[in-house]
Amino acid sequence: MTDDTLPERSRLVQEQLRAAGLAAEIRELPDSTRTAAEAAAALGCEPGAIASSLVLLADEEPVLVMTSGRHRVDTALLASQLGAATVSMAPAKLVKTLTGQPIGGVAPVGHPAPIPTVVDESLADYDTLWAAGGTPHTVFPLAYAELLALTGGRPLRVAED
């Protein structure tokens, strides 16, 4: 798929991947990849290899959490690791404002401004990760080290397995 056939949001993400020196190509899939289970089924991989992007609020400040699709973020654990009193899900409208992307398609990059990022340590268990490419139908592959470098993310445990 060439850049000019990708949705606009995905083209922005692809540009940032290239600027970061990554060879990853965004793929547009016919079925939704809005959930980790849908993405894993479409890609033929384990749900844990899906790097789901969640925008959370830590003491009302946004943080992008790249979490493994094999579990849910433990907000109490994450709050303690971030030194925050509370961690909660950001409302959909705020997610769209902060990222320019819809829930279910939020990429690790391609946002109007950088968002402090946490990367789930359990993603290191997989050789190839799949992240959303800016829409609920686009994804791209990358390695854990590439995800850390791309986002400038802080590795943390975000759930008890």
Image (cartoon, rainbow, N blue to C red):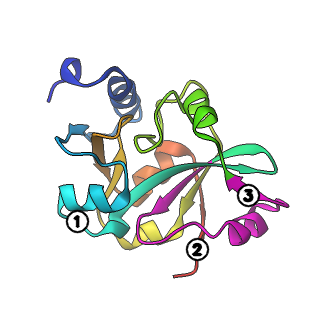
- Of helix, strand and loop, which one carries label 1? loop
Identify residue for label 2: 159
Residue 121 marker: none
N-term-proximal mark, 3 vs 2: 3
Q: From the image, state whether disc 1 or disc 3 is nearer to you.
A: 3
Marks 2 and 1, how far apart at CA = 21 Å
Separation of residues labelled 3 and 2 (CA atoms):
13 Å
Picture coordinates of residue 65 (x, y %)? 57, 54
Which amino acid type corresponds to the residue marked 1 in the rendered image?
Cys
Mark 1 sits on what residue? 45
Relative placement, left or right, of 144 versus 4 is: right
Farthest residue to the top: give it. Answer: 4
Q: Disc 3 marks which residue?
A: 87
Q: Is the Cβ of the residue at disc 1 closer than 8 Å to that at disc 3?
A: no
Residue appearing at x 26%, y 61% in the figure: 40
The secondary element bearing badge 3 is classed as strand
The magenta region covers 64-88
Q: Are marks 2 and 1 in contact (CB under 8 Å)?
A: no
Q: Name the kind of residue labelled 2 in the image.
A: Ala
- Residue 109 position within the rendered picture, expressed as x and y whole percent measured from the top left: 48, 36
Q: Which of marks 1 and 3 is nearer the N terminus?
A: 1
